[in-house]
Amino acid sequence: MREKLEPSDTGKRVLNADGTAVGRIADVENGRGYVVLDPGLTETIKAKLGWGSVTDEAHPLDSGSIEKITDDAVYLRGTL
C-alpha cells in the first residue's frame, strides 16, 4: 500500500476514515489529487476512463490527508 497519488489512481473511490464513500478522484496533477464529491454516473465513467478534469467543484487532496491507497480506493485519515 502507498500514500502518494499517481495518475493511475484517477477514477478511484475516496472514502472517509469511517469507510463512507465521499467521491472519486477526478484527476491527479503533480502528486495532488482532485476529488469530485458524490459524482453522477457520467462523471464516474469519465474519471475511470481518465477523461476527468479539474473543475471548480473538485476539491484538492494532498498526500497528508491520505491514510492508504489500495487497488480500488483512496482512504482518508479523517473526513473530506
Image (tube, rainbow, N blue to C red):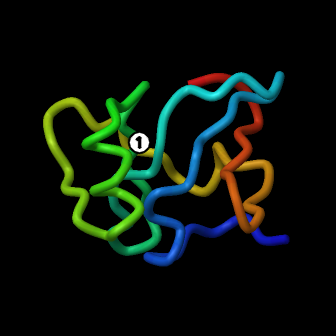
Q: Residue at x 35, y 57 (%)?
A: 47
Residue 66 vertical position relative to residue 6 in the rendered view, above or below: above
The spot of residue 34 in percent (x, y) is 37, 49
Residue 70 vertical position relative to residue 42 in the rendered view, above or below: below
Q: Residue at x 27, y 56 (%)?
A: 46
Q: Residue at x 28, y 37 (%)?
A: 58
Q: Residue at x 63, y 69 (%)?
A: 4
Tag 1: amino acid: Val
Depth check: give the residue in front, 12 or 65.
12
Q: Quadrant of the C terminus?
A: top right
Which quarter of the figure has residue 22? top right
* Relative to 18, 66 lies left or right: left
Depth check: give the residue in front, 1 or 44.
44
Residue at label 1? 35
Q: Quadrant of the N terminus?
A: bottom right
* Relative to 46, 25 lies left or right: right
The spot of residue 33 in percent (x, y) is 43, 56
**Is label 1 in a helix, a strand or a loop?**
strand
Residue reaching furthest to the left: 56
The spot of residue 14 in percent (x, y) is 60, 41
- How dense is the environment of label 1, judged by Cα within 10 Å: few (below 14), some, or many (20 and up)? many
The count of marks equals: 1
Residue 19 vertical position relative to residue 49 in the rendered view, above or below: above
